[in-house]
Amino acid sequence: MKTLHKFFCSGLVILSLFTFVESGHAARAKYIFKVASLAPEGSVWTKRFREFTSEVTEKSKGEIGFKIYAGGVMGDDRSMYRKMRVGQINGGGFTMTGIGEVVPDFRILGIPFFFNSYEEVDFLQEKLFPRMQEEFDKKDMVLLAVSEVGFIYTMSQKPITTLSELKKSKAWSPEGDPISQVLLETVGLTPIPLSIPDVLTSLQTGLIDTAFNSFYGSIVMQWFTRIAYITDIPFVYAYGAFILDKKTFSRLPPHYAQMMHSTAQKHFAKLLDDTRQSNEEALQVLKDNGISLVQLTPESRTELLNYREMTVEKLVGDAFSKGIYDEAVVHLEKFRKTQAAPQ
C-alpha cells in the first residue's frame, strides 16, 4: 500500500501541468538556462534533473542557474523545439519521437524488437553516443545526456492476445513518429496520431482504446486509470535526450562546459537505475490496481516479428540513415557473440 501511495501521488502531479520552478540562484546567475520538459513534477526524471541542476549551480558558485518548466507547460516536443530556436527556452528534455524529427538518426534505438535486454541497450548507447553528439552539433544543439522511459508495452481497454485483436483496436501512435506509424500500418492498422499530452483525454473520450507506454510512464501520466490490460511483450525501447542550445552553451567558460558534461553524465546514469527500478515497482502497482497481463499467442508473436523486418526495410534510409543502422547492427552482433561465448 505504501508503494501504491507513492506511485499514485507521483502520477497525480500530471493534473497540474503548468509548473514553473526557478532555482534560488537563477535570478542573480551569470549564465541562465531555461529548460522545459514533458516530465511531470514528482517523477524520477524531474527529481534527478533537479539534483543535476543543484550540483551545477553549487560547483559554479551560483554563476550557473536554471529556470525549469516541467509538466508540459511549454507544450509538446515540437513546441519546445520551436521555442528553443527563437530563444524562449535554451533546451530541455525531449522524447526520442520529438527530437527525432530534427535529428533522424537519434531514432535508431527505437526500432521495434531491436533489443533483448537492457545490457544490449547500454552497450549500444555507449558506442553510438559520440556519433549522436556530432549529429546534434550539426543542428546547433548540445547533447548532454540520454534519458530513458524503458521498454514499452501495449496497454488497452480490451485484451489483445492476437494480431487480429490488435487490428480491431483504435491504436495511438506518437505524432511525428514514423517508426510506430509504419509498424502499425504494416501490421494492418490505421493508427491515430496524437501528441503525448493528448493521449489521456483521448482514452477518456474513446477516440483511442489502445496506447503504448512503460509501466512507470503509464502511472505518472495517469494513463493506467483508463486501461485494463497489458500485453506482456515489450516491443520497443523508449528514451529521450537532454539538450541545450549550442549558442547559449558556447557562452560558458570551457571549465564550466566540461563540468556540465561530466555532471550530466553522472546524474543521468543514476537516472537509468531510477527508471528501471521504478518500472519494476510500477508493474506490481498496476496489478494491484486490477490491470491484467495477457500473453500474445505464439503464432501472433512470430508474425509480429516478421512484420518487424518489413518495417525496418521501409524505415532504413528514410526514418534514419543506412549508415547508423549498419553501425548499430554490427555493434549488437559483436556484443551478442561476446555474451554467447563460453566463459
Image (cartoon, rainbow, N blue to C red):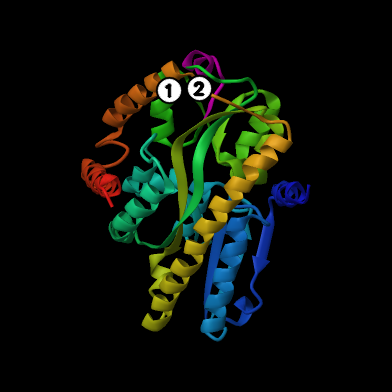
Q: Is mark 1 on a helix, strand or loop?
A: helix
The crowding category of the residue bearing disc 1, from other C-alpha atoms within 10 Å (few below 14, some 14 to 19, many at least 20), is some
Percent coordinates x, y for residue 220 in the rendering:
66, 46
Q: Do the residues labelled 1 and 2 touch (CB within 8 Å)?
A: yes
Amino acid type at image mark 1: Arg
* Residue under the point 30% across and 24% down: 310
Percent coordinates x, y for residue 258 in the rendering:
39, 77
Looking at the rendering, the stretch of residues picked out in magenta corresponds to: 163-172
* Residue under the point 49% across and 46% down: 78
Q: Quadrant of residue 196?
A: top right
Whether 20 is drawn above or below 238: the answer is below
Whether 46 is drawn above or below 207: the answer is below
Q: What element carries label 2?
A: loop
Residue 22 lies in the magenta-colored region: no
Query: In the rendering, which numbered label is found on residue 296?
Result: 2
How many numbered circles are shown?
Answer: 2
* Residue under the point 30% across and 41% down: 320
Report whether residue 188 is seen.
Answer: no
Percent coordinates x, y for residue 272 in the rendering:
50, 56
Residue 166 lies in the magenta-colored region: yes
The crowding category of the residue bearing disc 2, from other C-alpha atoms within 10 Å (few below 14, some 14 to 19, many at least 20), is some
Observer-nearest residue: 153 or 337?
A: 337
Whether 24 is drawn above or below 44: the answer is below
Observer-nearest residue: 48 or 142?
A: 48
Residue under numbered circle 1: 301
Percent coordinates x, y for residue 146 in the rendering:
43, 57
Q: In which quarter of the image is residue 232?
A: top right
Observer-nearest residue: 289 or 298?
A: 298
Q: Does residue 61 appear to the left or right of 188 in the view shown?
A: right
Q: Alpha carbon of mark 1 to alpha carbon of mark 2: how far?
A: 6 Å
Report whether residue 238 is seen.
Answer: yes
Amino acid type at image mark 2: Leu
